[in-house]
Image (cartoon, grey):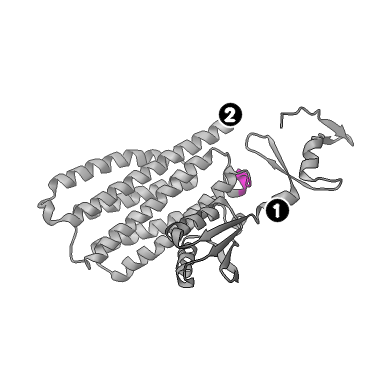
Amino acid sequence: MNDMIRRVQITGGSTFIVSLPKEWVKNVGLTPGSEVLIDILPDYSLRIAPLHRRSRRDIRVKEIEVSQDNVDTAIIEILSAYLAGYGIIKIRYKDISYDTLARIIDKVRSKAIGLEILDEKSNELTLYSIVDTSLLTITEALEKMANTTRSMLEDVERILKRYDEKILKSIIERDDVVDKLFLLITRQLNQLLLGELSPSNIGLVALPEALYMIISVKSIERIADHAVQISKNILKNNGRFLLPDQIIELFSKTKDLYIDTIKGLKSLNKKYANKVVTLSKELEKLEEKIRQNLINPLGFPEAYLVLDNIRRIKAYSLDIAESVINIITIREYAHT
């Protein structure tokens, strides 16, 4: 449909009105008395949608066939439907046992918040997304995700000094919480980019922030993964090796670097982001010095595994800091 120009008129001395295109009104089924939803976008343009159509978006249905041929990719397909914003996911299955399907569904539900089985028939199972994204904005979900990852890193620091199997297993379990929040935020960002949510609905100011937000949440998710990798490695060895004090010190400083990064992300304060950029260079030099001083590297492979994970945590923290600076710059640009 081509752009149209409408003249603004005033009625009653104070009410501004503009007529809607007749073709659009007919196509969306508006009648006298119908209600429309008007969103004010960050660039001060307006988005108008029929209220009844907006409500139908919440119940879009995705049908997925699961058979012996796609058992391995079924989890990816179901999670993709969840991320796209589908409210109902119907799963039809054949040539597989119910136990196999149950394992697929359990795996999906361990990764996604609010997916529940509310209908079940012969050879068909229906998942409903019952999470209300308006009750948990991106900034709130991000804070929970960041705090969970912080607690994982703090516990890794603790077990590097003193082995504790319960703490190690707890770190690994908490990674599921981080994954769930990551997928929830990704779902919200997808809905934003599809035009089903406005930035203000999910705690953002401008649409381009979505790009740097996904970089940030993915980086936090990967940092949590590296905390798990360190924990699994220590658990596998039953704590039978002790790391040099220099590596434990490097991990502690890298954990503190992450904490400063998250402070910058929560407050959108360049002070923290700039501090992270400076400190990351210092940690890089410290890591190089530790690697050079390690004696008998072939007899101490665990130290190098931990060092590699520390390096990744530092790199992802730096990615978040750069995203913070980019978000701040976008907001400054939007207000000029």
At a point 63% along the width and 47% down the height, the residue shown is 196
Task: Tell me if residue 127 comes above or below residue 265 in the rendering.
Answer: below
Q: Which residue lies under the disc numbered 2?
A: 336
Image location of residue 228, percent across then percent down: 33, 59
Is the N terminus in the top left, top right, bottom left or bottom right quadrant? top right
> What amino acid type is highlighted by mark number 2?
Thr
Is the C terminus in the top left, top right, bottom left or bottom right quadrant? top right
Mark toward the viewer: 2 or 1: 1
Q: Is residue 331 or residue 270 the one in the foreground?
A: 331
At a point 29% along the width and 62% down the height, the residue shown is 232
> What amino acid type is highlighted by mark number 1?
Ser
Q: Which residue lies under the disc numbered 1?
A: 55
> Mark 1 and mark 2 in contact (Cβ < 8 Å)?
no
Q: Is residue 296 or residue 107 the one in the foreground?
A: 107
The quarter of the picture where residue 238 lies is bottom left
At a point 39% along the width and 38% down the height, the residue shown is 274
Q: Can you see residue 270? A: no
Using the numbered discs, state the Cα–Cα distance from disc 2 to disc 1 in whole angstroms. 35 Å
Q: Is residue 191 or residue 123 the one in the foreground?
A: 123
The quarter of the picture where residue 165 lies is bottom left
Image location of residue 95, percent across then percent down: 48, 67
Q: Can you see residue 198? A: yes
Q: Secondary structure at mark 2?
A: loop
The quarter of the picture where residue 162 lies is bottom left
Indicate yes or no whether the magenta region holds residue 198. yes
Image location of residue 249, percent across then percent down: 24, 53
The span picked out in magenta is 196-201
Q: In the rendered view, does 119 fall on the left or right side of 305?
A: right
Image location of residue 11, percent across then percent down: 88, 35
